[in-house]
C-alpha cells in the first residue's frame, strides 16, 4: 500500500522540475547508502537495502554492524509509518492541483538551462535591496562553479543554490544548500554569504564556542531580566533550534522518499518519549484532518507550507510527503518534521517565561539527540545532527547555521507600529542584533503583534542569543510606553 502510494506520488512529482539527488553515499556506510537510496528510489529501496544487511556488512567491523542494525530499525520505522498512513488519497494539504508556484519547485528560465541570469543579476545588484545571492554570485563565481556538483548526497548545483534569490529579488539571503558539502564545495560563494549575514563571524577563524549545544543551552547563564512593562506586553514565547540528520541530504536536495524515510525514523524516535514530560503524538500531514491542520497553524504550532520563496528553494518538493508535526498534549514541546530543515525542535508557551521555555528546549534538544542515536544505532561520538567544523549546526539556509537557534517573543506594541511602522522597528531591531517578523512568522503581515527574535545564530553561545532577544523586548516595551496616544 505504501509502495503504491509512493509510485502514485512519484508520477505526480514527475510533472515538476526534477531535483538532482543522486546516490553517492560512501560505500560501506549502510545507513548513508540507505538514505541515499531513499533519496533516489523510494521506500521500496529502503526495504531492499535493509532486508539483507548481512550481505553488505563485514561482521567483524563494528561500525558497519551498527549501521546495519540502524538500517533494520529504520525499515521497522517505515513499516510503522505505513501503518499510520491512511489509504492513498489525492488531498494536497493546501497545495493547488497542477503546478502551484507557492509549493512547486519552478526553476528560473535561465537557471533551468544552467545559464547565468545576467540581466536579472545586474538589475538586482543595482537595486536598493540586493539579496546576498545576487551580491555574491557574480559572473566570475558563476563561471567558476556552474558545472560543479557538490560531493554530497544531493549533488547540488549553483543553479539550484541561487534559484530562490533570482526568482524573488526581495529575498534577504536568496540561496540554499542541498547537502552539508555544498557549503565547502562552493565556498567562494557560500563563505562570503555566511560572513555577510553573520556579521563579525570569520569562516577562516571559525567558531570558538566551548562545550556542546546542550551545555550552552543553560538557563542559569541568562543574566538579563525582562522588565515589568515587557512582561505585560508579551503574549507568548518560543525558542527553536534547527537540526538536520547527518545521514540524509538536506531537504532542498532531497526527495519525497528521503523525507518519508526521515518521518519514518522520527515516528520511532517519538515513541521513546512516551511517559516523559516531552511525550506526545506525531501527526503526518497526510493523516491530519484539514481542521486539525488549520487549528495548529492558527495556534502557531505548525508551518504554513505555502510560501513561494521556500518553494523556489526546493523546501516543498513532493509536498506533503513526509511532512509532520509532533507535540505534547499542551503543545509546549513541538517538533516540525521536514518543513525546510529536517527538524525544528521547538519549545513554546503563552506568556513571558523565557527561562522556562529555554529550559524545556534544552531538555528536548538533548532528548532528541539521544533517542535518534539510540534508534539509528549510532555510537557515542558519531554525529547524529549534521555539524560543520567551522560553524556548528548545518541548515538549508545560511541564515540558520551555527546554533540554529531563534528565540522570539510575540509582543504587542500597537502605538509604536502606528507611529514608526514595521520597517523602522525592524531597523532598530537589527541595530540591536535582533529582527522583527510579522504576526504569523517570516514573510507574513503584521496584524496586531510582532515577532522579535535574535538575529545572530553563530559564534555566540545559545544563552547569549536569547539574552539579545530579551534586551530588545525591553527596549521595544519602553519605546511603546513613550509613544503618544
Ligand atoms: P522559524 O524561525 O521557526 O522558521 P517562522 O517565522 O517561520 O519561524 O514562524 C513559525 C511559526 O511560529 C509562525 O506561526 C509564528 O507565528 C510562530 N511563532 C514565532 N514566534 C512565536 C512566539 N513567540 N509565540 C508564538 N508563536 C510564535
Ligand atoms: Mg520559518
Image: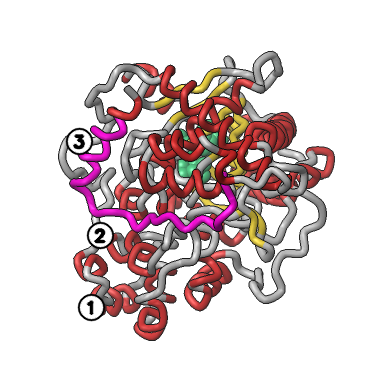
Q: Which residue is mark 3?
A: 96
Q: Which label is found at residue 107?
A: 2
x%, y% of residue 171? 37, 60
Residue at the (76%, 40%) spot, across then down: 225
Nearest-to-viewer mark from 3 and 1: 3
One can see residue 485 in this view: no
Name above or below for residue 454 compared with residue 78: below
Name above or below for residue 58 compared with residue 320: below
Q: Which one is in front, 226 or 252? A: 252
- Residue furthest to the bottom: 140
- Position of the N terminus by quadrant: top left
- Which quadrant would residue 227 be assigned to in this image? top right
CA–CA distance in space, label 2 to label 1: 16 Å
Nearest-to-viewer mark from 2 and 1: 2
- Classify mark 1: helix, strand or loop: helix
- Residue furthest to the right: 220
Determine whether label 2 and label 1 are within 8 Å by CB.
no
Instruction: Tell me where the magenta segment starts and ends, as one range.
Output: 5-30
Residue at the (61%, 43%) spot, across then down: 241
Q: Residues within 10 Å of mark 3 (few under 14, many from 20)?
A: some
Q: Which residue is mark 1?
A: 119
User: Which is more N-terminal, label 1 or label 2?
Assistant: 2
Amino acid at each position: 500500500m505504501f509502495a503504491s502510494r509512493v509510485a502514485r506520488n512519484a508520477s505526480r512529482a514527475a510533472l515538476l522540475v526534477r531535483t538532482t539527488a543522486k546516490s553517492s553515499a560512501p560505500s560501506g556506510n549502510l545507513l548513508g547508502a540507505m538514505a541515499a537510496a531513499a533519496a533516489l528510489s523510494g521506500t521500496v529501496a529502503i526495504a531492499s537495502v535493509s532486508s539483507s544487511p548481512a550481505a553488505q556488512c563485514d561482521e567483524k567491523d563494528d561500525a558497519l554492524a551498527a549501521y546495519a542494525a540502524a538500517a533494520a530499525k529504520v525499515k521497522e520505522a517505515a513499516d510503522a509509518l505505513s501503518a499510520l498512513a491512511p489509504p492513498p488519497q489525492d488531498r494536497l494539504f493546501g497545495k493547488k492541483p497542477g503546478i502551484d508556484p507557492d509549493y512547486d519547485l519552478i526553476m528560473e528560465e535561465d537557471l533551468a538551462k544552467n545559464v547565468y541570469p545576467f540581466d536579472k543579476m545586474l538589475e538586482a545588484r543595482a537595486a536598493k535591496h540586493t539579496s546576498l545571492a545576487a551580491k555574491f554570485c557574480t559572473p566570475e563565481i558563476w563561471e567558476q562553479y556552474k558545472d560543479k556538483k557538490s560531493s554530497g548526497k544531493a549533488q547540488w548545483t549553483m543553479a539550484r543554490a541561487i534559484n530562490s534569490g533570482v526568482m524573488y529579488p526581495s529575498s534577504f539571503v536568496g540561496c540554499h544548500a542541498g547537502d552539508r558539502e555544498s557549503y565547502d564545495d562552493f565556498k567562494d560563494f557560500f563563505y562570503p554569504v555566511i560572513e555577510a549575514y553573520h556579521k563579525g563571524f570569520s569562516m577562516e577563524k571559525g567558531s570558538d564556542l566551548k562545550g556542546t549545544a546542550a551545555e550552552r543551552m543553560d538557563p542559569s547563564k541568562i543574566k538579563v531580566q525582562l522588565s515589568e512593562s515587557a512582561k505585560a506586553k508579551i503574549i507568548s514565547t518560543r525558542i527553536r533550534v534547527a537540526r538536520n540528520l547527518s545521514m540524509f541530504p538536506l531537504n532542498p536536495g532531497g526527495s519525497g522518499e528521503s523525507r518519508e524515510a526521515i518521518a519514518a525514523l522520527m515516528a520511532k524516535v517519538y515513541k521513546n518519549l512516551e511517559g516523559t514530560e516531552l511525550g506526545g503524538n506525531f501527526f503526518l500531514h497526510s493523516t491530519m484532518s484539514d481542521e486539525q491542520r488549520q487549528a495548529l497553524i492558527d495556534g502557531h504550532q505548525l508551518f504554513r507550507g505555502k510560501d513561494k520563496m521556500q518553494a523556489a528553494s526546493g523546501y516543498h518538493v513532493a509536498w506533503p510527503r513526509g511532512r509532520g508535526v509532533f507535540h505534547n498534549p499542551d503543545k509546549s514541546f513541538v517538533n516540525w518534521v521536514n518543513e525546510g530543515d529536517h527538524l525544528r525542535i521547538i519549545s513554546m508557551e503563552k506568556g513571558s517565561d523565557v527561562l522556562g521555555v529555554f529550559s524545556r528546549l534544552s531538555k528536548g534538544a538533548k532528548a532528541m539527540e539521544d533517542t535518534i542515536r539510540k534508534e539509528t544505532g549510532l555510537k557515542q561520538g558519531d554525529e547524529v545532527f549534521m555539524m560543520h567544523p567551522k560553524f556548528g549546526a548545518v541548515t538549508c539556509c545560511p541564515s540558520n547555521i551555527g546554533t540554529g537557534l531563534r528565540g522570539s517573543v510575540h509582543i504587542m506594541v500597537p502605538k509604536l507600529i502606528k507611529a514608526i511602522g514595521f520597517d523602522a522597528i525592524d531597523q532598530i531591531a537589527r541595530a540591536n542584533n535582533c529582527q522583527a517578523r510579522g504576526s504569523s512568522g517570516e514573510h507574513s503581515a503584521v496584524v496586531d503583534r510582532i515577532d522579535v527574535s535574535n538575529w545572530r545564530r553563530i559564534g555566540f553561545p545559545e544563552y547569549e542569543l536569547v539574552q539579545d532577544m530579551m534586551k530588545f523586548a525591553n527596549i521595544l516595551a519602553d519605546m511603546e510606553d513613550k509613544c503618544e496616544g
